[in-house]
Amino acid sequence: MKAYLDLLQDVYDNGVGKDDRTGTGTRSVFGRQLRCNLSEGFPLLTTKKVFLRGIIHELLWFVRGDTNIKYLVDNNVGIWNEWPFQNYLNAQDLGNLEKHSCEWEERLDAFVIRIQKDQDFAAKWGELGPVYGKQWRNFSGIDQLDWVINEIKQNPTSRRLIVSAWNPAEIEEMAKAGLPPCHTLFQFYVSHDNKLSCQLYQRSADLFLGVPFNIASYALLTMMVAQVCDLELGDFVHTYGDVHIYNNHENQVLEQLSRAPKSLPTMSINPNVKSLFDFTFEDFELLNYQPESAIKAPVAV
């Protein structure tokens, strides 16, 4: 994943100060691109350990069209917890509670436990609104994932193999419970030698925390689609709009840049799965992953 480290260095060296929605502040550049040949290995960072279990469960959550965090919470994946929790605090007139203070952490733990155990509470406070899964599976009545799979099979030379999470009619509703989609649109491409590639356009990219997840997630999605469409693997291309490093991630970025990448792992997928909608967590096995230790950093909410 030298390409990722090169991009990280580029933004660290050339990014300019820019205010942001979270109030954290960033180093930001506009318009970059990264490319991975998926036949060379699974593009999971080796210069820090990445939470693959969370990536897989989140992707399956998207594919099933789910928009409530309960599935993730039940599988011990907390990557989406802070957005609905903050909305819950706001409703309790506790919106100004200092983030990651002892009281904040205690209330978050209690919130997660209640999501697990109280169905009615989860239905109300675990809901993120019409975010990724909703748009992928029901964009104004269109199941985009089902459509694109059928189109790849029937019309592989099409230049319209696109799935969009950016639905202007529902952006404000998404923003109320979480945030509008950062990875907004992806397009598949079938080459003359039957290789499937995917290009993602990401309007806003948290380079240290979010982007490694996004790369692995869409690489895995491409592998899943290739399998069910009986295609070989091509490239994953990641195109960015505002790509940034948060100011409170700078020390972590420097530590990341001091490490040398290792050989990429490989991803084994159960070959018996023939429908995109039939995959389960147990259908994936990562092989030969030997990363450096994890590097923790706060999420900007």
Image: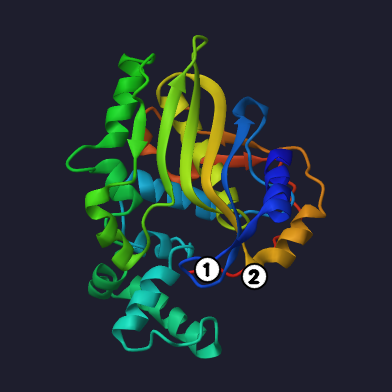
Percent x, y of residue 8: 69, 50
Name the side, left or right, on which 241 lies relative to 162. right
> At 46% from the left edge and 25% from the top edge, which residue is drawn?
226
Residue 288 lies left or right of residue 147; in this view the side is right
- For badge 1, the amino acid type reads Ala
Q: Quadrant of residue 100?
A: bottom right
Of the pair 280 and 238, the residue shown nearer to us: 238
Residue depicted at x 36% and y 63%: 69
Give the residue at the far left of this rendering: 141
Residue nearest the viewer, comparing 297 with 294: 297
Point out residue 162 in the picture as x, y percentages from the top left corner: 36, 31
Gap between marks 2 and 1, in whole Å?
9 Å
Mark 2: which secondary structure? helix
Residue at (63%, 36%) from the top-left corner?
42
Three-letter amino acid code at disc 2?
Answer: Asn
Disc 1: which residue: 300
Picture layout, residue 150 above or below residue 15: above
The residue beneath circle 2 is 248
Q: Is residue 155 above or below residue 61?
A: above
Could you tell me if residue 293 is visible in this image?
no
